[in-house]
Image: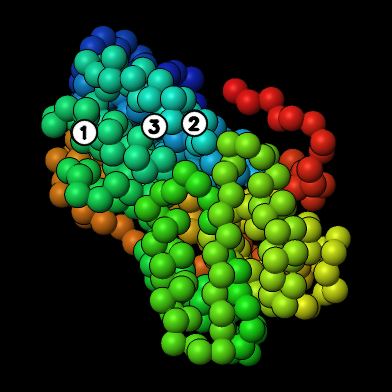
Amino acid sequence: MVTIREIAQKAGVSIGTVDRALHNRGRVSKATQERISRIIAECRYKPNVFASHLSLAKQYTFAVLTPEPEQDGRYWELPMRGIRKAADELKPYPIRIWPVHYDKYSEASFFRAGEKILKSRSEVDGLVIAPVLSAASETFVRRIPPALPYVFIDSYVPDTSCLSRIAQNPYRSGALGARLMDLLVGGMGTVAVCRMVPRDYHIDDRVNGFTEALRFRKDVEIVSFEADRKTDEAVFYHLAERILAERPSCNGIFVPNSLGHQVAQLLKERVQPGRIHLIGYDLVEPNLPFLKEGWIRFLISQRPDVQGYQGIQLLVQHLLLKNPVPAEMNLPIDIVTAENLDEHVETGPQERSDRPADARAARPSGRRAVRK
């Protein structure tokens, strides 16, 4: 079906002019009105009720509070991709998206970003938040005015008044990871779980789901290893070194975030293929070659682009169209392997960027990273 934008292009006028002609608002010359009406008739255009509501709305601003896009193997580019898609679809209408980013490993950075939004409260109508710094997010959420609706993506803060929460069910995805690991290790051996500090609820739920699902396997020992990303850019690479040194009989590693490629790089350098089974998360570029080569056996995808897209759409539904929205949206748990990877990255919702993966990025460079 033809869109208002296509009608505007055919008529040689702006989208705003077509909108005024359709709804009899503002001055449109008789000749322009007739030209637009003729094109509408020829194209059999039918007005979109959704668009009609938006065209009548005031200017709305939706702030988006997420980590810096390049962090975690460029994971945070993926929800921003979905947010940009939603913004592009809403471009003809009075909606502005305001991205505000913070350093995922710095509470001070998070508070600065949050303060920027709160200082502009009179101009912000809705908020999409990725609250991966749990403690800082709890403090920030308590300061959000009651009249400002906000949607959580990727992670969550419990016992809040969020409009909606969009994510994978983290406990179930962790339990699924455990089932896959059980198949790989044959129900016996030592499985290491990599954890990051500072903690966030979402990752904790994944780890809890994983450990609980394997708790009844008496021949499987689960050991937890923690590291602090603040002090080490290649944190999981060095954590994998610790695992090999302290648990040389380890035959499985579970990475509940997007940094599986760092562990895979170490395994590729030090371990015989197939001896240690690695399960990770997310279709970030650095993970993909290791999945193809078999160093990562499974990746669990949580569709971050869909999360970002739906976050904006729920605010539109709530604020502009006055429609009820679900308190929680649990996205499917996708299992990605070397065999079905191409379908996910080429035709699925998470399309690959044109920038090639650099497997060497996981290696420690010997230089201290420059932090923003």
Q: Residue at x 48, y 20 (%)?
A: 12
Q: Residues within 10 Å of mark 3 (few under 14, many from 20)?
A: many
Q: Nearer the viewer, mark 3 or mark 2?
A: 2
The quarter of the picture where residue 22 lies is top left
Q: Secondary structure at mark 1?
A: helix
Residue 368: percent from the left, percent from the top?
Answer: 74, 30
**Farthest residue, direction front:** 246
Q: Nearer the viewer, residue 262 or 290?
A: 262
What is the number of callouts on the image? 3
- Position of 71 compared to 11: left or right? right
Q: Nearer the viewer, mark 3 or mark 1?
A: 1
State which tag comes first along the sequence, 3 or 1: 3
Q: Residues within 10 Å of mark 1 (few under 14, many from 20)?
A: few
Q: Which residue is mark 2?
A: 106
Q: What's the residue type where badge 3 is placed? A: Val
Q: Which residue is mark 3?
A: 64
Residue 226: percent from the left, percent from the top?
Answer: 56, 54
The quarter of the picture where residue 175 lies is bottom left
Q: What's the residue type where badge 2 is placed? A: Ser
Q: Is residue 82 visible?
A: no
Compared with residue 246, is residue 367 higher up or lower down, i.e. above or below? above
Contact between labelled residues 1 and 2, with CB atoms less than 8 Å apart? no
Marks 3/1: CA–CA distance: 17 Å
Q: Which residue is mark 1?
A: 142
